[in-house]
Image (tube, rainbow, N blue to C red):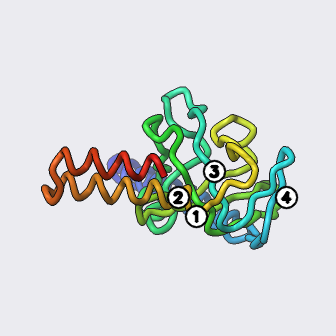
Amino acid sequence: MARGKEEIIIKLNKMRKNYIILLLLAFTTSAVISQKKIKLKSYAENGVTYKKGDVFWLGEPSGEDGKYQFVRIGGWMQNVRSKGMYLSAMNIDRPFKIKKLFKYDDPRWKSVHASVGSYNSTNYRVDLDNAIANGEIKQSKGEGEVVSNSIGKYEKLAKLKELLDSGVLTQEEFDSEKKKILNN
């Protein structure tokens, strides 16, 4: 008889755990679904207006682990891993071009985000409000900077490095081309 009670208690505990998990899942799902995502044409912060096509550079990471806390891999990769994939300090001074701006408008969470790209095909997500406040984004280096030329230079260097790594270019050819790109 005692063994039957133990089995019932074990089953009840499992049911209780499953019920709690379902409640947590329902709560987090409703929180995500209830967030309203509003597309923005531009966003102004600290006297700087950000818009689609603008370029900014990463500053110093603000995380204790040496990673950016407000810049992470976005796109489909953010759905693959439950834990955010944040960039490391190796990305200081890396340029990012703004693809989209949007704002979450929810009583629990209000912030402006940007979907950005760099010289690879991966999309990144930036929490602009917090990244600016924590110095993870550097402001443009000067007025009149041409966005397409700035990102184009880095794209060319990345492509050049790929050609060197694959053996298409020699080190001397790479150095010569790199010098031409940097001097333009």
Please tell me whether mark 3 sits on a helix, a strand or a loop.
strand
> Is residue 174 left or right of 60 when viewed as pictured?
left
Q: Which residue is mark 4?
A: 107
The secondary element bearing badge 4 is classed as loop
Q: How many marks?
A: 4
Read off the residue under disc 1: 148
Is 48 rendered above or below residue 89? below
Of circles 2 and 4, the one toward us is 2
Q: Are marks 2 and 1 in contact (CB under 8 Å)?
A: yes
The Cα–Cα distance between marks 2 and 4, rounded to whole angstroms, is 37 Å
- Give the image location of residue 23, x and y in percent: 61, 61
Q: Name the residue located 45 percent from the left edge and 50 percent from the top edge.
A: 9
State which mark lies toward you, 4 or 3: 3
Decide which of 153, 111 is in the foreground and name it: 153
Q: Quadrant of residue 35?
A: bottom right
Amino acid at pointer 4: Pro
- Kind of residue sitting beneath label 3: Phe
Outermost top residue:
64
Instruction: Give the CA distance from mark 4 to mark 3.
Output: 29 Å
- Spatial CA distance of label 1 from label 3 is 12 Å
Of the two numbered discs 2 and 3 on the same chain, state the one appearing first in sequence.
Answer: 3
Q: Secondary structure at mark 1?
A: helix
Instruction: Judge the density around disc 1: few (<14), some (14-19), many (≥20) Cα neighbours within 10 Å.
Output: few
Q: Mark number for residue 91?
A: none
Which of the two discs, 2 and 4, labels the residue nearer the N terminus? 4
Q: Which residue is mark 2?
A: 151
Q: Secondary structure at mark 2?
A: helix
What's under tag 2, amino acid-wise?
Ile
Q: Position of residue 14 (x, y in %)?
A: 44, 55
